[in-house]
Image (cartoon, grey):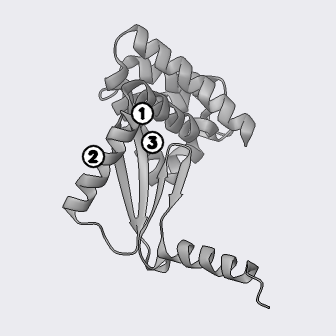
Amino acid sequence: MMVHRGLARRYARALFNAALEKDIIDPINEDVENFKELLETDPYLKGYLISPKILTEEKTALIDKAFGERANPLFIDFLLLLIDKKRFDHALEISEAYISIYEEHCGIVEAKVISAVSLDESQEAKLIEKLQLETNKEVRLTKVTDSKILGGLILFLEDKIVDGSVKFQLESLRRKLKEVKVY
């Protein structure tokens, strides 16, 4: 898995650098996001494009037909390179890596918050504001509701996890109480 991540990051970095050189990182990011969504929603597409039974010419024709009019030529060439180098099986990971590199370059950070009940707009806005002040980056927040945490929040931001859930606090209290010696 680690080899795949490194490979995906190298290909994504190469695409990003080429887009940066041509000053088209935004349109390429849009193409990558659309492509990633297509791969995630159409399982047959990836299977077709990685199949050794399908001729390269047929795969190329499909890419041209599916994306030729809508996508940037640099992105089309990149997809054709993946087919030619037999790396299309890593296309989803490469797409994710590109988006990550793009967001890092643009000062965007992904955050995920898990709460016992859904956050209202005011709470969400306050949380985003605090996170943006803390990170000096634009924060894109993904919200998940999970009643198992009982209350509070669990926050995932960059490489940090902040567990402020009631469940975690109760478990911590239970562990501390077990350590107390009673005479």
The three-letter amino acid code for the residue at tag 1 is Val
Can residue 101 be spotted in the picture?
A: yes
- Asked if the residue at tag 2 contacts the one at tag 3, i.e. Cβ–Cβ closer than 8 Å, the answer is no
Q: Residue 31 in the image: x percent, y percent? A: 37, 31
In this rendering, position of residue 86 left or right of residue 135? right
Can residue 83 be spotted in the picture?
A: no
Q: Which residue is mark 3?
A: 36
Q: Residue 62 in the image: x percent, y percent? A: 46, 34
Q: Residue 45 in the image: x percent, y percent? A: 51, 45
Instruction: Compare marks 2 and 1 and give the one earlier in the sequence.
Output: 1
Which residue is drawn at the image coordinates 34% and 27% (left, top)? Answer: 71
Whether 60 is drawn above or below 74: the answer is below
Quadrant housing the N terminus: top right
Nearest-to-viewer mark from 2 and 1 = 2
- Residue furthest bottom in the image: 183
Q: Which residue is mark 1?
A: 32
- Asked if the residue at tag 1 contacts the one at tag 3, i.e. Cβ–Cβ closer than 8 Å, the answer is yes
Quadrant housing the C terminus: bottom right
Q: CA distance from mark 2 to mark 1?
A: 28 Å
> Which image quadrant for residue 168?
bottom right
Judging depth in this view, the residue of 16 and 107 nearest the camera is: 107
- Residue furthest top in the image: 21
The three-letter amino acid code for the residue at tag 3 is Lys
Q: Which residue is mark 2?
A: 129
Whether 31 is drawn above or below 13: the answer is below
In this rendering, position of residue 66 left or right of residue 45? left
Label 1 neighbour load within 10 Å: few <14, some 14-19, many 20+: many
In this rendering, position of residue 155 left or right of residue 48? left
Label 2 neighbour load within 10 Å: few <14, some 14-19, many 20+: few
> Which image quadrant for residue 76?
top left
Disc number at residue 71?
none
Q: Secondary structure at mark 1?
A: helix
